[in-house]
Image: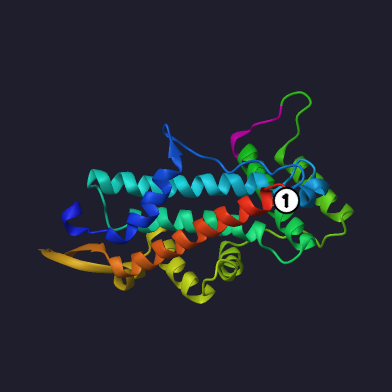
Amino acid sequence: MSTQDFDGTYLIPLFVLVEKLRVDGAYQPLPAPAPSSSLAAEEAPLGPWPATHLIRTSYGAGLAHIDALRRLTVAGEVDATSPWTLMRGALENFATGIWLLDGPGRPERRWRALSLWAEDMRNRAQHEQDTGHSPGPGGKSGAERRREISALAESLGLPPLVAPKANVILEQAAPAAGLDPVVVRASWRAASGFAHGRFWPYLRASQPRAAVETDDGYLVAMVVDESQHGRLAQYCHTMLCHLRDRYLARAATH
């Protein structure tokens, strides 16, 4: 569909914010934590597996998802699926950063960071197996790195590491940003349905615009239900602002 079918005014605050964070075609990264910051002290026992690296990469990925939607909107190439898929990616990215940053207590936050690193290395090991890749001399495989991370968690007296689930991350991050986890989760479910090509989201989160008769019924043209997508955009904006403000505060010198 064209932008004549899509207003998207509700996206302006989010787009303006992302544009401010983009300079010379690149997104401004979150800074490394100052040596005397609370983040640096918290991460000291984690060695090469700090939460801040995961937070910063999640933050950058979220900005890229939103900016991709901005560019699609400017080009007039907005379809009924991509706005949901891209915003869902951004929501998960910002929620992950908040989940790592705002867990209750240092042991819990360290456990979350190492759990996500262990899952990262598990996925890397799966890719290595699929592609037949072997580390070079002196290198270690994803499986070996994952065992190192698990051993580190045990040495710190942390519970066994568990693969984080997207819905759990979202549910635990939303209250930290002042959001209702149930309504955020409902919006995320619709976006996930679009991302996976499911049928039900078109019935619950799209609007029909036209219908063409075919041999076996009607082909219905669907467009984004902007009232529902607007709520998802608002959640993304809130989480982005909270993640950035909270990180900068904890990464600063104290």
Foreground residue, 45 or 138?
Answer: 45
Q: Nearer the viewer, residue 254 or 12?
A: 254
Q: Secondary structure at mark 1?
A: helix
Give the colour scheme of this rendering: rainbow
Query: Please, which residue is most extreme toward the left here?
Result: 213
User: Which residues, given as a range, are shown in magenta?
Assistant: 130-135
Q: Quadrant of residue 234?
A: bottom left
Q: What secondary structure characterizes most of the magenta part?
A: loop
Considering depth in this image, is 35 or 230 the residue closer to the camera?
35
Pointer 1: what residue? 39
Q: Image point 55% across, 53% down: which residue?
A: 244
Q: Position of residue 241 (x, y in %)?
A: 51, 57
Question: How many residues crowd mark 1 within 10 Å: few (<14), some (14–19), many (20+)?
Answer: many
Q: Is residue 197 left or right of residue 160?
A: left
Along the horizontal axis of the image, is 217 left or right of 251? Answer: left
Q: Position of residue 55 (x, y in %)?
A: 62, 49
244 is higher (above) or lower (below) than 75: below
Say which residue appears at 50% left-offset and 46% top-offset: 61
The residue positioned 55% from the left and 68% from the top of the image is 174
Residue 20 seen in the current view: yes
**Looking at the picture, which amino acid does disc 1 mark?**
Leu
Q: Residue furthest front?
A: 254
**Residue 222 drawn in magenta:** no
**Residue 133 is covered by the magenta coloring:** yes
Residue 182 point in image, percent of width and height: 51, 76
Instruction: Note whether 234 is above or below 44 in the view shown.
Output: below
Can see residue 216? no
Q: Does residue 219 appear left or right of residue 131 in this picture?
A: left
Residue 60, position as x, y percentages in the image: 52, 44
Q: Quadrant of residue 224?
A: bottom left
Up the image or down, 23 lies above or below 105; here it is above
